[in-house]
Image (tube, rainbow, N blue to C red):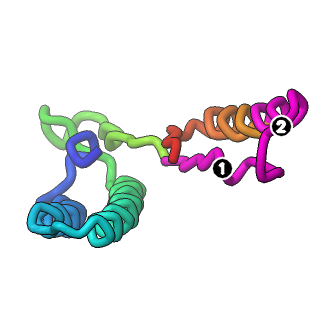
Amino acid sequence: DLATANADVVLRATCLKPLELLGSQVEKQESLAHITQAEGEAVKEFDLAQGRIEEFLRKAPAVVPPGGPGGPPVAPPKVKKQRIVKPADLVEVTYLETKDDVNRFLGALRDELEDALAKNERIQIR
């Protein structure tokens, strides 16, 4: 997404540095609990980076074409907004025990996914 957005050095550093630091910490870690904690932090940092990239693109001015300022401005690249879908959050019961339970769950999941597509969002399943 950073490449698609033609991100500057500052945005790249802001997005990648926290993830690189977590990666180096995990390499030295032997405790599964600490690695799991770092994984949770990495997901949070990833989400923050996505938000920063989306904000960067919202504020990006129209790009002047390589031919010079006389040509028409070109729209900046776009990265689709992200929708995080957590299937476990869509379940209304603790266990799916009947065909109706499964159908309700699949219907809710389908509705969520189709809503994201209708809004031109890309979907990440967690």
User: Quick check: can you spot residue 12?
Assistant: yes
Residue 54 spot, x, y in % from top left: 40, 55
Q: Say whether residue 60 is left or right of residue 11.
A: right
Q: Say whether residue 3 is left or right of residue 118.
A: left
Residue 48 spot, x, y in % from top left: 38, 65
Q: Say whether residue 68 is left or right of residue 112.
A: left
Q: Say whether residue 103 is left or right of residue 23.
A: right
Q: Is residue 104 magenta?
A: yes
In the picture as drawn, the residue positioned furthest to the right comes out as 100
Query: Which of the labelled discs sits on residue 68, or is there none?
Result: none
Amino acid of disc 2: Glu
Residue 64 spot, x, y in % from top left: 22, 43
- Rendering quarter of residue 99: top right
58 over 102 or under it: above or below: below
Mark closer to the observer (2, 1): 2
Magenta stretch, residue numbers: 82-107
Camera-nearest residue between 91 and 64: 91
Q: Is residue 9 magenta?
A: no
User: Which residue occupies 34% across, 64% down?
Assistant: 36
Amino acid of disc 1: Ala
Q: Which residue is mark 2?
A: 97
User: Quick check: can you spot residue 59?
Assistant: no
User: Which residue occupies 60% across, 49% down?
Assistant: 86
User: Which residue occupies 11% across, 61% down?
Assistant: 27
Question: Pointer 1: residues within 10 angstroms few (<14), some, or many (20+)?
Answer: few
38 over 94 or under it: above or below: below
Callouts 2 and 1 close, C-beta under 8 Å = no
For mark 1, give the secondary structure: helix
For mark 2, give the secondary structure: loop
Q: Which residue is mark 1?
A: 88
Residue 119 spot, x, y in % from top left: 63, 40
User: Which residue occupies 20% across, 42% down?
Assistant: 3
